[in-house]
Amino acid sequence: MTIYYDDRAVRITSELIRVEGRAYPLTEVARVWHVRGGRSWGALAGRGALLAALGGPLVAAAIGILIAVRLHTSVTVTIAIVGVSLLVGLAAAPVADYLLEHVDRSYSRGAHQLEIWAQWRGTPVRLLATGDALRFGQIYRALERAVEQAAIPVRR
């Protein structure tokens, strides 16, 4: 028996597909396909909020510099305001790495609901529904390898 994919909810072997406690022997599966559902606007809004948070300190620094130049105060006060504004802008650098990492992860997870379906004993059965695009791809590729070995048609 060959194991193609294994996590706590899904296990795909050369003999069966086990999803959340239900087992589907590959000999009883006629075909496999996938469906991409609607867009998750919450995921897109979260991604936009992360990008807006990244620009916040930079905008604050630019506004501080503009205020310092427009106030017509002494050179010392102007330099102090510009210095503080630059420090606020530079504070975005350490935060940027953290925020960009979360933006990358949001793209890995995807913004669509993804489903894997199979015809099992003549009936369409939804094997998996997830919003995690990376995990979906891993599971679907493992399922493709398993059904190729069992000579089951895969519809794209």
Image: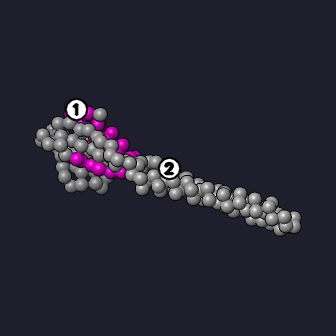
- Residue 110 highlighted magenta (yes or no): no
Residue located 27% across and 49% down the image: 128
Could you say which quadrant of the image residue 31 lies in? top left
> In the rendering, which numbered label is found on residue 104?
2
Q: In this view, does 37 lie to the left or right of 109?
A: left
Observer-nearest of 22 and 82: 82
Find the magenta span and give its range: 126-155
Residue located 62% across and 59% down the image: 56
Could you say which quadrant of the image residue 118 lies in? top left
Residue 40 in view here: yes
- Residue 141 highlighted magenta (yes or no): yes
Observer-nearest of 126 and 145: 126
Label 1 to label 2: alpha-carbon separation: 34 Å
> In the rendering, which numbered label is found on residue 73?
none
Residue located 12% across and 41% down the image: 121
Mark 2, Cα crowd under 10 Å, few <14 / some 14-19 / many 20+, is: few
Residue located 40% across and 46% down the image: 134
Q: Where is residue 129 in the image (x, y as percent from the top left)?
A: 29, 50
Q: Is residue 120 left or right of residue 55?
A: left
Mark 1, Cα crowd under 10 Å, few <14 / some 14-19 / many 20+, is: some
Amino acid carrying label 2: it is Asp
SS category of the residue bearing label 1: loop
Amino acid carrying label 1: it is Pro
**How is colour applied across the structure in the image?**
one colour
Q: In this view, does 14 lie to the left or right of 131?
A: left
SS category of the residue bearing label 2: helix
Q: Mark 1 points at which residue?
A: 153
Give the prevailing secondary structure in the magenta stretch: helix
Q: Is residue 117 above or below residue 54?
A: above
Q: Is residue 135 above or below residue 71?
A: above
| First of labels 1, 2 by sequence position | 2
Observer-nearest of 59 and 100: 59
